[in-house]
Amino acid sequence: MPERLDYTWLSYAGTARVGLAIVLVAVAVVTVYAGTRLHRPVLPPKPSAQVKVIIVVGLGLAIAAFLVCLTEYADGLRRHNLLRVLPKDPSPIAPVTAVCAIAIFVAINFLTRSQEPPVRVASGLIGAMVAPMIFEFPFDLIVMTRVYPPIPPDPSLYRVMFFAPLFLTEFLTLSLLSLVPTARLTRPTFLCFALMLLVFAAWALAGFGFPATAGSYAFNAVSKIIAFVTALTLFIPSPKPL
């Protein structure tokens, strides 16, 4: 019987670490440049009533599909006796996420205090939902091919089954920003997102490992906090958005 592991994805090693770090730095540089070109905040496109329904219903269906696929993924692990291999705490960063979610909900309600209560509450809830997705989307792209342990007989199929509805959920969650009048792209949004990518790059040079060590935990926590700050910048009041 394999011993319990301290990770749920394989770390990067050798030239792969350097390559990943270079890509992340390059994307961060492009993001900073895009931010410098943004002279005024930009409102996201406002969807029609029909599109709003599609976004909300689609998100619900995507979450349901992810939960179904997650159940099948767990069943695959169980059938091959792999659940015992996983860490005792597969999500050690969850307390940080929970605290940040509460903090950003309160902060957004303060920033949007000039709005009606329903708008403030909706903005806070959407901000708290969007913030983890800002972290998760690039994070999932980085780890999706390195998920461990592989599930026979076709590990790639199980990865697609897990990540396809997850990416759809992330995209539709980000689309919720178009449903509130308080969200807008600002220069700090780009700069904060670039900073998160730079932390990812430093994490990549250290192997981008599962947060089972103090170093990996710190990289994970710091980048998650920056993701929430990035989301918070979306709700900075501005008198003249584009």
Image (tube, grey):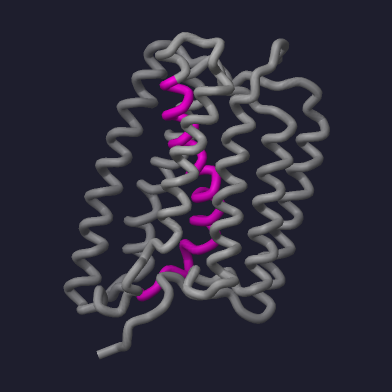
Residue beneath the point at 34% across and 19% down: 53
The residue shown at (53%, 66%) is 217
How many marks are shown on the rendered structure? 0
**In the visual, does 168 lie left or right of 154?**
right
- Frontmost residue, 178 versus 160: 178
Q: Magenta residues: mostly which secondary structure?
A: helix
Q: Where, by quadrant of the figure, is residue 107 drawn?
A: top right
Left or right: residue 188 compared with residue 233: right
**Residue 148 included in the magenta stretch of the image:** yes
31, above or below 71, in the image: above
Identify the residue at image location x=58%, y=45%: 227
Residue 117: percent from the left, percent from the top? 43, 13
The percent coordinates of residue 139 (x first, y second) are 53, 56
Q: Quadrant of residue 129?
A: top left
Q: Which residues are magenta?
A: 121-150
Q: Quadrant of the N terminus?
A: bottom left
Q: As drawn, is 161 to the left or to the right of 209?
A: left
Residue 203 on the magenta segment: no
Left or right position of 9 against 56: right
